[in-house]
Image (cartoon, rainbow, N blue to C red):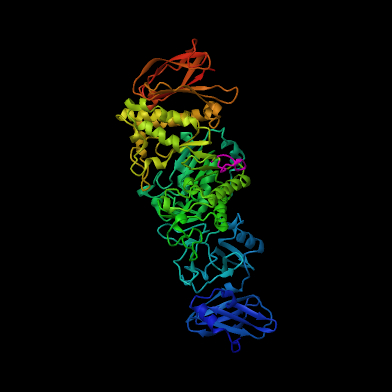
Amino acid sequence: MSSESALPIDQSAVEAIVRGRHGDPFAVLGMHGGGDRPLRVSVFAPPAAEVAVIDANTGKPVAQLERIHPEGFFTGSLPRRKKPFPYRLKFAAGENSWEAEDPYRFPELLGELDSHLLAEGRHRRLYERLGAHPATLEGVEGVSFAVWAPNAQRVSVVGDFNAWDGRRHPMRRRYEAGIWELFVPGLPKGAHYKYEILGAQGERLPLKADPVSFFQQQAPETASLVHGLPQHEWRDGAWMEERAARQAVSAPISIYEVHLGSWQRGENDSLLGYDALGDRLIPHALDMGFTHLEFLPVSEHPFTGSWGYQPIGLFAPTSRFGPPEAFARLVDRCHEAGLGVIIDWVPAHFPSDEHGLAHFDGTALYEHEDPRLGFHQDWNTLIYNFGRREVSNFLQANALYWLERFHIDALRVDAVASMLYLDYSREPDQWIPNVHGGNENLDAIAFLREVNTRAYAEHPGVTTIAEESTAWPQVSAPVHSGGLGFGYKWNMGWMHDSLEYMRRDPLYRRHHQDQLTFGLHYAFTENFVLPLSHDEVVHGKGSLLNKMPGDRWQKFANLRAYYSFMWTHPGKKLLFMGCEFGQEREWSHDRSLDWHLCDDPAHGGLQRLIRDLNRLYREVPALHQRDCDPAGFEWIDASDAAGSTFVYQRNADEGGDPVVVVCNFTPVVRTDYRIGVPRAGAWDEIFNSDAELYGGSNVGNGGRVVAAEPGRHDRPASLSLTLPPLATLILRPSS
């Protein structure tokens, strides 16, 4: 059984393997030779004192390898064998012995097409090849690893299975694609791993998490976990068939924005898992009448205080709430209940944590080398190099991954403005103009257009939403007509102006009527979402309720009137969690919302108001069908600045009834207030934010009023109304 005296072997190669410095381990380790050359098997196994080669077909030992280096390098020739054959290794150390497959006997993992597409930056499903995938190769179960690190001198898989020793599992380099790959036999699902990388200059880098890991340790731990692509049997066929119609510009879209870690907590302030969240969150959203849930970023992130906006594991739903399959179940349950799911997606930047993408292979691989292009000063983060095809492909594949593997209905893309402008939040000497001398980030623009084009083409019915705060044109216009290709854009201008107006004492609102009217000058230049998001209730801004002026009653009345203005204004709706019942404390990611407030009559009334506004928004076509169409809105009278009143008309598609909305943003009851309406006859007061049901003073018009001549405000008829204090009315022709 013992091998003959080992033939000469390159001692420098042995030393490089032992020192963890060899960039081509497959040239040394494993079985070599055959034909005219005797077979040789070389193994690096530091824990072993003895190593034997076992014929995998017969189970019989064929050679005992010689230990030629004290660190554990074994080698030996097999002179009686002329052709390579499947084999196993038997190890011994003291009284212990064990058998294992040799990772270095297996062939290349990436096929020619995959390698070509990865090299070209056109592999839209790179997550099927990169990362850690449980697999069976030549009848042997194990895990296939692959990672992009083109400038590295050596990459190894390290983990709890090899004592985190980078010398034990160095990977094969695929020069044509800059990929390193290795099949590790016998590795179980759940094994912890990272990559140990020698940089371009031979420096040993901090251990790196897998950029395409599907499951990661909970913070503050940072290892990736062997998991493979999430598996789930979907039951949302009915939703998927209806999705395009439910997300169209003519559909009612009312979004409940949620931070999963602080919506509600469990016993002893514990985090709820994805399944428990589904048990509680879905019924609440349905009861409140929302059509969609929007989750703050669910990609794995090391710093809880970033709320997910500084992700490390773009392909891994955060393990704070359970495994990836549990997140898939949550989405599936939402769909079965008729709720769409939006996730915040962060392709603009990434954190500089040493275990992440920063200087991944010792070079600025994912980011720009020049900080004027690659460093975001506001957030102390790094900016992706969108012009590098492999980086653009990585991000595009990530977007498609969420849409395909988790049936996500919409991606709300964070910080788009910071992507579009090279001089975003920079002084004149802190940025580099583009090739034309301008401040537009041409690479980012091309990237966003490509992402949107592919998302809509490959996943019909999805939509994308831009958080974009500037006047960049055609954000939600199709790419083929020169736009960025988003489905919707957040209307940050409306949010800013309307909140500024509502903060003012009603006595002074008469001087700022334009803050509520100006938005209509551009309301139809994009497909807008009106956002009252998490950003408005943090960092010392206070809650929405406490932004309102006046005593306690007036604060609630102001907020009721404001919500009613928002729900009747053109544009889709978004409301952050807790705002539906008037959370009083500023939001904190470290604690649950104050749900006990719902037992208070004022808070409970506000919650009923949101529920009814959502119901009306869904049921009354005039309030949603033409949200993004200029024909859907007409001012009746916005000239009464002294009274701080606004009267407008919302129109349905042809043949549908209009509604008339009247807002009184003063605490003064106004009687015999005459407004023009588009038709004579009876009109029903279908909503009054001052109703006693909502905590109001119950001033109103008795449910029905009659319009007659003479007309007013260029309408053929007019109504005489009583306007409640700090309130909004909605009227509709009687059927």
Q: Where on the picture, by quarter, is residue 502?
A: top left
Q: In this view, does 543 lie to the left or right of 678?
A: left
Going 49% across and 68% down the picture, which residue do you hit?
A: 197
Going 62% across and 47% down the picture, which residue do you hit?
A: 458
Q: Identify whether 184 is placed above or below 624.
A: below
In the rendered image, the quadrant that contains the C terminus is top right
Q: Where is residue 387 in the image (x, y as percent from the top left)?
A: 55, 55
Q: In this view, does 336 lie to the left or right of 295?
A: right
Asked if residue 483 is among those painted magenta in the image, a careful observer would answer yes
Residue at the top extreme of this rendering: 709
Magenta part of the chain = 475-486
Q: Where is residue 545 in the image (x, y as percent from the top left)?
A: 35, 34
User: What secondary structure do most residues of the magenta stretch adopt?
Assistant: loop
Residue 678, visible in the rendered structure: yes
Q: Nearer the viewer, residue 494 or 282?
A: 494
Q: Position of residue 320 (x, y in %)?
A: 44, 53
Going 49% across and 10% down the picture, which residue do you hit?
A: 710
In the rendered image, the quadrant that contains the N terminus is bottom right
Q: Where on the picture, by quarter, is residue 338?
A: top right
Residue 230, visible in the rendered structure: no
Q: Identify whether 118 is placed above or below 399.
A: below
